[in-house]
Amino acid sequence: MNQCRPFVVAVASEKGGVGKTTLATNLAVYLKALHEDLPVTIASFDNHFSVDNMFAIGRNSGRSVAGLFEMDPVADLATMGEYGVQFLASERDLSPPDDDCLRLRKALAGSGFGGILVLDTRPILDYFTRSALAAADLVLVPVKDRPSLVNAASVQQALVAGGGDPSSLWLVPSLIDARLRLRENIGIREFLVFSARERGYQVLDTFIAKSPKVEGLATNLTSRVYPVLTHARTTVVHRQFREVASFVLDRYGEGFAALSSLGNDASSGGESTPRLRRLVGDCPVCGAGIQGEEGHFFFDQRSRRRGFIHGRCLARLLENTDLKTLAGTDGGLVFETVSVDESGPESAFTLRLFDGGSAEVVAEQMIAAEDGLFDHFWQGACGRPVEELYREILLVTLDAGAPRRFLEGEGRARFSSWRRRVLREVFPRA
């Protein structure tokens, strides 16, 4: 698979002691083990040198991570390390070169450095953590208790502020002690998952258990740090890291496999390439293919599915709404679920109209249609049964055009800018 830049996975938390570095380093090892032909690289912006202690072969530490911010060729910075994972040497005194947190993203865009790049960030939202978030295609936030869950909001805010997509952020329950129970015999993991989803976060189906054996891999008599894959395969954590790595590989594959169907022209946009996700070929309303004709671009925040709706099909969705008289060709629509019950999300969802400047014009509460039209639309756009949907946000452009117009260059940038501004209005309510 040809890439013009790496798929970036940032592991971030504003709270220390949540297993962030353990997650980042072991994720890199498991990614390589599950996909031997895939280039996997890891770098850390922290100064604890855990990455070096796990991956350096002998005294060969290679080039420093500081080179990423000096615009050095990325391929020249990476050194082959243990377990087939490339790494960039940590830096004890890493100083910001400027105040441009998009500098890293620019350095990676069009670098020709492919595969997956795992970034282990600092436990503070400084220049380097914000730079990692701005460059990330996927953000994993380990949480082990309520304080770390509360702090996840700061990471999400920094992600959005840097132009990132909130739907790229996933929480990973970490260092979970199954023996501990809260009131009414509720486990820590169950509490975290419930509380996180109540706040609108996406949470991995798996978790990382607390394990004395795994903790001992970084606290031996030498400075060497060992991965779970080679030294703790008999623990449940081995299976859990495999599941986390499989999740990341799925996200990586979805992003690039969808793009391959568009041909070389669509992939020539450099930075846009890894941000395309799950391009849907059929209209979610009627189920018929777009076949290159003009359509209204839609984007699902949670799954990041993207596709097009026929103009006639969007007209059907708006047929019995008050918005149809106000909707022009500027701006877009936001479909937002309000509650989910046995009758599906359409029993209570809001349809909002935003103008081209991202200002909300009007909102309308929608009621279920007897013909099941919106059921079909939600399922087609989100790719999941309606009973599984929760706090979904779908964005649809009022302007129609050929698919390439919204997937490349100026058109893609214009939609992304409009979407980010709209999300700042929508997410406080989500």
Image: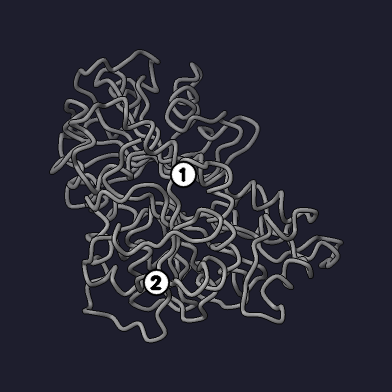
Image label count: 2
Question: Residue 129: which disc?
Answer: 2
Residue 196 place in picture, x, y as percent: 60, 58
The residue at the far front in this view is 58
Dot 2, how many residues are within 10 Å of its Cα: few (below 14), some (14-19), or many (20+)? many
Amino acid type at image mark 1: Arg
Q: What element carries label 2?
A: helix
Residue at position x 54%, y 35% in the image = 345
Question: Residue 302: which disc?
Answer: 1
Rendered image quadrant of residue 72: bottom left
Residue at position x 42%, y 72% in the image = 89
The Cα–Cα distance between marks 1 and 2, rounded to whole angstroms, is 23 Å
Question: Residue 254: which disc?
Answer: none
Residue 90 place in picture, x, y as percent: 43, 75
Rendered image quadrant of residue 395: top left
Given residues 346 and 34, the one toward you in this image is: 34
Given residues 430 and 418, the one toward you in this image is: 418
Residue at position x 37%, y 65% in the image = 132
Q: In this view, does 115 lie above or below 228?
A: above
Residue 51 place in picture, x, y as percent: 51, 70
Contact check, label 1 and label 2, Cβ < 8 Å: no
Circle nearer the viewer, 1 or 2: 2
Dot 1, how many residues are within 10 Å of its Cα: few (below 14), some (14-19), or many (20+)? many
Whether residue 167 can be seen here: no
Label 1 vs 2, first from the N-terminus? 2
